[in-house]
Amino acid sequence: AAGVRVIELQLVPNYSAADKLRGLKLGWNLPRLVDQVRSQLTLVAPDIIHTHLWLSDIIGFLAARGMPTKLFSTQHDTVPLPLIVKLFKKAALRRAEKVVAISEAVRAFTLSYFNLPDDKVVSIYNGIDVARFAAAVKPDSEWQPTLGVIARLEAVKGHQTLFEALGKLKKSVGTLPKVKIIGSGSQETVLRRLAERLGIANSLECCGYQGD
């Protein structure tokens, strides 16, 4: 990041996602993680701490205790959490000055799930410069509908819902748009099998992970 100081901390060893969510190993290490971050906060003395996702929300909240630093959090999803994680995250979000949701659906979930005041959460959509893509627009006579999905191939990203919708669309109208699936993940084999079962595999182009 040009002009921005980046401090890399080795916070979390190579635990599986299941270990993290169950807290089997992370719980033992949480005080150490918080202390590392608090040490950096003491040195840097930031005016604002901006966290993303549940682990950084909790660590940021605990590390900034007693400091005048203002906390902000951005919420990206509507994924339920284990009870103990939910309680810690709820405390973190209540401590925040504002919580940013990337969509109205995420805002509604955050307000309800964490029981937050309505004015605590604001919606700010991810910024996309649509002008960059204007040059690629074709005349109507040449236009063929194409859908694109850029996401990890994990259950939380909702590819199954898309595939099932495409299956229903094919049954009702007989044809499908071209669909480009960009990304990789643990659900790739499961999704390929689902596409074959729904009869939509020929309309899908699986592009894998793209570094650009």
Image: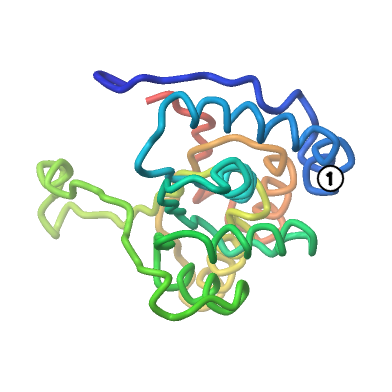
Residue 70 at what x, y percent from top left? 40, 51
Residue occupying image coordinates x 62% and y 74%: 113
Residue 57 at what x, y percent from top left? 57, 49
User: Relative to 184, does residue 92 appear above or below in the rendering?
Assistant: below
Residue 54 at what x, y percent from top left? 62, 50
Residue occupying image coordinates x 45% and y 61%: 176
- Say which element carries label 1: loop
Q: Can residue 60 be seen in this view?
A: yes
Q: In this view, does 70 lie to the left or right of 165?
A: left
Residue occupying image coordinates x 50% and y 51%: 203
Q: In which quarter of the image is the N terminus?
A: top left
Q: How crowded is mark 1: few (under 14 residues within 10 Å), some or many (20 or more)?
A: some
Residues 110 and 144: in front is: 110
User: Relative to 1, does residue 106 appear above or below in the rendering?
Assistant: below
Residue occupying image coordinates x 59% and y 78%: 115
Q: Which colour scheme is used?
A: rainbow
Q: Quadrant of the C terminus?
A: top left
Disc 1 marks which amino acid? Gly
The residue to which callout 1 is attached is: 23
**Going by the picture, which residue comes out furthest to the right?**
24
Residue 132 at what x, y percent from top left? 15, 41
